[in-house]
């Protein structure tokens, strides 16, 4: 987990891009919060739409893993990759309200009555006086992210059984610099005095999770050759 690593050009690009979005957002919001909300982080603007890019890329990459390497892997690996693809595509669809604004489609009466923004999506649906977004996408997801970034890497490095299971199912484990980048992102948005800071967080965290997916600590589990996988698993058990 703590082994130094040489970053590839793509890793550096994703880190620099994420940093640029966040720092620019902080500076603009401190100078003119209205311009930040109405231009920089506006609905359907660049920052919000960027979120689709890493999500769709993750969808394609996960499906590629199944299609290209699936026959060399365990069924656990293939199921996880399909779930990653499904989840990434679902979140991307939710972000654009399933193309509602793109294709100028009107919401049904159900969504007009039960969606806080009268849009065709689930994350803005209301349960009583609370948004599903607050219950699921904020509270539960935050807990899951905390476990994934802070607890799981430690268990992976300390517990042979956890390492064996994680590698078998193909769950990417974040590298130390990736964990640090995510923590910096969460801390940085606190300097944006606007509720629109969530747009910056979404753009940043989806990009960083794509970074983890493409360049995990246990990158070897995504390699094609089954004999190499078996050799690595055996070495890890020693």
Image: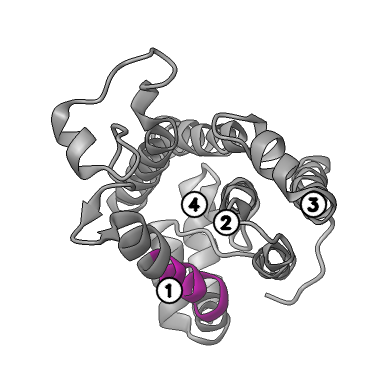
Q: Residues within 10 Å of mark 4 (few under 14, many from 20)?
A: few
**C-beta proximity under 8 Å, tags 4 and 1:** no
- 169 with respect to 175 (left or right): left
- 191 with respect to 43 (left or right): right
Residue named by callout 4: 227
Mark sitting earlier along the chain (2/1): 1
Q: Secondary structure at mark 4?
A: helix
Residue named by callout 2: 195
Label 2, label 3: how far apart the Cα atoms are: 19 Å
Residue 143 numbered tag: 1
**C-beta proximity under 8 Å, tags 2 and 3:** no
**C-beta proximity under 8 Å, tags 1 and 3:** no
Residue 166 numbered tag: none
Q: Secondary structure at mark 2?
A: loop
Label 1, label 3: how far apart the Cα atoms are: 24 Å
Which region shows up in magenta?
A: 141-151
Label 4, label 1: how far apart the Cα atoms are: 36 Å
Q: Residue 153 appears at what percent x and percent y? A: 56, 75
Residue named by callout 3: 19
At x 30%, y 35%, the residue is 118
Above or below 203: residue 155: below
181 or 49, which lies in front?
49
Mark sitting earlier along the chain (4/3): 3
Q: Is 156 colored magenta in this rendering?
A: no
**Disc 2 versus disc 4: nearer the observer:** 2
Q: Residues within 10 Å of mark 2 (few under 14, many from 20)?
A: few
Above or below 8: residue 149: below
Q: Secondary structure at mark 1?
A: helix
Q: Residue 73 appears at what percent x and percent y? A: 38, 47
């Amino acid at each position: 987990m703590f082994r130094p690593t040489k970053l590839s050009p793509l890793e550096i690009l994703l880190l620099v891009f994420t940093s640029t979005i966040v720092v620019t957002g902080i500076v603009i919001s401190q100078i003119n919060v209205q311009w930040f909300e109405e231009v920089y982080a506006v609905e359907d603007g660049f920052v919000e739409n960027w979120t689709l890019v890493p999500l769709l890329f993750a969808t394609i990459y996960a499906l590629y893993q199944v299609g290209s390497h699936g026959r060399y892997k365990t069924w656990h690996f293939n199921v996880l990759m399909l779930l990653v693809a499904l989840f990434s595509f679902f979140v991307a669809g939710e972000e654009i309200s399933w193309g509602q604004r793109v294709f100028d489609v009107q919401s049904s009466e159900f969504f007009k009555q039960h969606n806080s923004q009268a849009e065709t999506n689930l994350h803005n649906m209301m349960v009583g006086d609370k948004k599903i977004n607050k219950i699921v996408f904020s509270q539960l997801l935050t807990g899951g992210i905390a476990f994934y970034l802070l607890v799981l890497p430690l268990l992976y490095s300390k517990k042979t059984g956890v390492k064996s299971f994680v590698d078998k199912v193909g769950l990417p484990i974040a590298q130390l610099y990736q964990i640090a980048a995510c923590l910096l992102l969460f801390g940085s948005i606190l300097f944006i005095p606007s509720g629109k800071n969530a747009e910056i967080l979404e753009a940043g965290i989806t990009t960083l999770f794509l970074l983890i997916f493409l360049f995990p600590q246990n990158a070897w589990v995504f390699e094609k050759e089954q004999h190499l996988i078996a050799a690595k698993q055996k070495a890890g058990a020693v």
